[in-house]
């Protein structure tokens, strides 16, 4: 990975971490700046989310309250797949539940910056 790629991945990792922050999750406006208008997620529950449904639900989902369970990410790595496209993989624990996660971020223009285009969460069964 080139130095430039490392900088790009670091920027995308920072945005991914923002999406796990209660301060961001509880704000539809802040989340909207981080999700691509064509955003799709397949959650750990198997539910499919789009941009509109995620903006509506995220502020009341687990991980959005300062005094509630919060995401703890580990092993986050990223790869620049093509100019303007980054793939992240990592695991999280939320309220004792582990999930393996994969996100695709894209940058369509300088003004909006990097936005999450796709996210997949797969539950990890207890060992």
Image (cartoon, grey):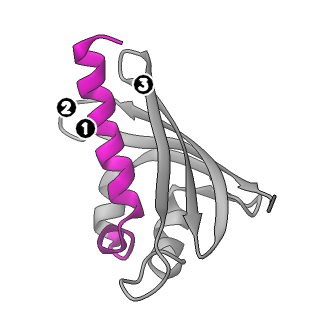
- For the N terminus, give its image quadrant: top left
Q: Residue furthest bottom?
A: 67
Residue at image point 44% right, 30% down: 78
Residue at image point 54% right, 43% down: 90
Q: Are marks 3 and 1 in contact (CB under 8 Å)?
A: no
Q: Are marks 1 and 2 in contact (CB under 8 Å)?
A: yes
The magenta stretch spans residue 23: yes
Q: Residue furthest top?
A: 2
- Residue on which the image places disc 2: 110
- Residue on which the image places disc 1: 113
- x%, y% of residue 29? 29, 67
- x%, y% of residue 107? 33, 31
Q: CA distance from mark 1 to mark 2?
A: 5 Å
Nearest to viewer (mark 2 / mark 3)? 3
What SS does tag 1 mark? loop
Q: Mark 3: few, some, or many residues within 10 Å (few <14, many ≥20)?
A: many
Query: 38 or 74: which is nearer to us?
Result: 74
- Residue on which the image places disc 3: 85
- For the C terminus, give its image quadrant: bottom right
What SS does tag 2 mark? loop
Residue at image point 32% right, 48% down: 15
Q: Is residue 105 above or below residue 27?
A: above
């Amino acid at each position: 990975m080139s130095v430039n790629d490392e900088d790009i991945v670091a920027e995308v990792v920072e945005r991914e971490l923002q999406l796990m922050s209660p301060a961001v999750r509880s704000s539809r406006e802040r989340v909207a700046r981080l999700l691509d208008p064509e955003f799709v997620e397949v959650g750990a529950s198997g539910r499919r989310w789009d941009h509109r449904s995620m903006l509506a639900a995220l502020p009341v989902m687990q991980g959005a309250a300062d005094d509630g369970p919060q995401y703890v990410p580990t092993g986050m790595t990223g790869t620049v797949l093509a100019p303007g496209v980054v793939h992240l993989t990592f695991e999280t624990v939320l309220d004792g539940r582990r999930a393996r996660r994969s996100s695709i971020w894209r940058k369509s223009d300088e003004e909006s910056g990097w936005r999450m285009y796709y996210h997949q969460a797969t539950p990890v069964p207890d060992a």
